[in-house]
């Protein structure tokens, strides 16, 4: 078989296609006998790939549109698994803020002055020994409430018993000498009448009798001193109160010159309170104090939440402290519950005035603006209006309430907050009331 060269092939059908190529073995050199013609490549493959690419883009666009359309329904199930940055922010409509309202009430209102004070014991006694000796008995427990006259400790009494016995023996001796001197004086008086003795001997005998009588008095004083020392060997409580920690144990030698002593007793019932108020309020307190009447004083804890005790004002200091412009006041409490301790820091409220029939609102309802304090008043059409009023000083109040200065206000309702989108002096809002036990929780109120 004779093959023709492509350059000399007379038939166009026999010419090689441009897509045809020779395939040779990589291990053998290319020869005319081993060369083969590769099959022609399909000319529609590129077109098909382009068609499949457009199809994938249409699927992606369809999925994106479906996700955008149904995202509100599936977002609650998907958002917990997405990072916060991937969660889209959806636009929300205007938010209606619910508020709490309360009606203005007519009631008596107490006005207080607030201050800071320190609890002070009316009596504080350091228990000390009045004689020197060995401490043989401690009869109290640390922190015990003791009554006046209770035995606290005992000191060895034997040295003082010996001193008393010596004084008693000396007294007996001097009494015997006195009897003998008195008999001698009687004889000298009889002899003087008979002119047997002289007046000088009689006078000397009288002086001796007086001297022995003085010695007897000294002996009795020594006996009384010894008995007093024996009394001091028994240490008793001088006041009623709480005894503190013991500073000396049994077996120690105690002396009157010891600096600490045995323990300290403080009186807790009643107990006093020293507190201060500004000098500007002195006149207000003086006007409230009437003869035979006492102003009420209440003691609270540091957070001003729990009332510890209630007492009365007993004294006002006679001068103002120039360093801080305050005056000291003294109150007294029965302290029956024992909640007040000496040197305890407390907050104080002093009742200085009672407003009868005042219109009272919660303090949370009072708002502050550029024109002063105001409240929102609820209108019948569920709108609010702004009302400006003058309120008392913040230091005066009762349980977080304020009193209206002027105007009639009973029956009005006011919210604590109104919706931000207010037009002019009115605003749309929602309101509700809550109850806890038997009292309405007053979050907001208003006046008219």
Image (spheres, rainbow, N blue to C red):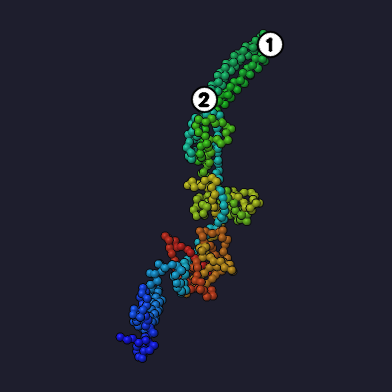
Image coordinates of residue 228 in percent, x first then y, are 55, 28
Q: Which mark is residue 18?
A: none
Disc on the earlier residue, 1 or 2? 2
| Residue found farthest to the left | 1
| Residue shown at 39% from the left, 69% from the top | 78
Give SS at disc 1.
loop
Give SS at disc 2.
helix
Q: Whole-Å distance between the Cαs marked 1 and 2? A: 51 Å
Badge 1 density bin: few <14, some 14–19, many ≥20, Cα 10 Å: few
The answer to whether marks 1 and 2 mark residues whose Cβ atoms lie closer than 8 Å is no
Image coordinates of residue 271 in percent, x first then y, are 53, 45
User: From this viewpoint, is residue 240 visible?
Assistant: no
User: From this viewpoint, is residue 27 visible?
Assistant: yes
Camera-side residue: 291 or 403?
Answer: 403
Residue 39 as seen in the image, left or right of residue 369? left
- In this rendering, is residue 6 above or below 192? below
| Residue found farthest to the bottom | 10
Quarter of the image with the N terminus in it: bottom left
Image coordinates of residue 182 in percent, x first then y, are 61, 15
Q: Nearer the viewer, mark 1 or mark 2?
A: 2
Q: Mark 1 highlights which residue?
A: 198
| Residue shown at 52% from the left, 31% from the top | 252
Q: Mark 2 highlights which residue?
A: 158
- Give the number of marks: 2
| Residue shown at 38% from the left, 82% from the top | 46
Badge 2 density bin: few <14, some 14–19, many ≥20, Cα 10 Å: few
Image coordinates of residue 349 in percent, x first then y, are 54, 54
| Residue found farthest to the front | 2
């Amino acid at each position: 078989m004779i093959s023709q060269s492509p350059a000399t092939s007379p038939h166009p059908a026999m010419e090689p296609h441009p897509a045809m190529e020779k395939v040779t073995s990589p291990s053998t050199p290319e020869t005319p006998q081993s060369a083969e013609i590769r099959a022609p490549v399909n000319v529609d493959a590129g077109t098909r790939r382009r068609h499949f690419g457009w199809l994938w883009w249409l699927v992606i666009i369809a999925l994106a549109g479906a996700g955008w359309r149904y995202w509100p329904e599936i977002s609650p199930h998907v958002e917990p698994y997405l990072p916060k940055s991937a969660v889209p922010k959806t636009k929300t409509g205007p938010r209606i803020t619910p508020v709490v309202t309360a009606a203005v009430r007519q009631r008596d209102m107490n006005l207080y002055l607030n201050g800071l004070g320190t609890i002070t014991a009316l009596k504080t006694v350091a228990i000390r020994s009045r004689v020197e000796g060995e401490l043989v008995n401690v009869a109290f427990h640390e922190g015990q409430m003791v009554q006046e006259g209770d035995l606290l400790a005992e000191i060895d009494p034997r040295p003082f018993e010996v001193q008393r016995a010596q004084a008693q023996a000396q007294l007996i001796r001097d009494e015997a000498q006195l009897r003998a001197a008195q008999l001698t004086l009687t004889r000298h008086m009889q002899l003087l009448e008979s002119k047997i003795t002289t007046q000088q001997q009689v006078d000397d005998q009288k002086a001796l009798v007086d001297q022995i009588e003085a010695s007897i008095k000294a002996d009795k004083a020594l006996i009384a001193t010894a008995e007093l020392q024996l009394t001091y060997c028994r240490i008793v409580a001088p006041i009623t109160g709480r005894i503190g920690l013991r500073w000396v144990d049994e077996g120690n030698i105690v002396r009157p010159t010891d600096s600490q002593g045995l323990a300290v007793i403080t009186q807790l019932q009643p107990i006093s309170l020293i507190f201060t108020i500004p000098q500007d309020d002195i006149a207000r307190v003086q006007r409230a104090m009437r003869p035979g009447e006492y102003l009420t004083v209440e003691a609270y804890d540091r957070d001003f939440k729990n009332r510890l005790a209630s007492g009365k004002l007993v004294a006002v200091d006679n001068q103002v402290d120039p360093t801080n412009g305050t005056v000291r006041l003294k109150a007294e409490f029965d302290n029956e519950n024992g909640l007040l301790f000496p040197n305890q820091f407390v907050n104080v409220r002093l009742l200085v005035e009672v407003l009868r029939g005042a219109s009272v609102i919660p303090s949370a309802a009072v708002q502050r603006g550029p024109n002063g304090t105001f409240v929102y008043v609820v209108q019948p059409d569920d709108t609010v209006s702004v009302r400006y009023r003058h309120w008392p000083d913040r230091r005066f109040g009762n349980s977080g309430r304020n009193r209206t200065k002027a105007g009639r206000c009973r029956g009005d309702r006011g919210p604590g907050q109104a919706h931000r989108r207010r037009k002019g002096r009115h605003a749309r809002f929602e309101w509700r009331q809550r109850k806890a036990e038997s009292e309405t929780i007053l979050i907001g109120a208003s006046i008219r």
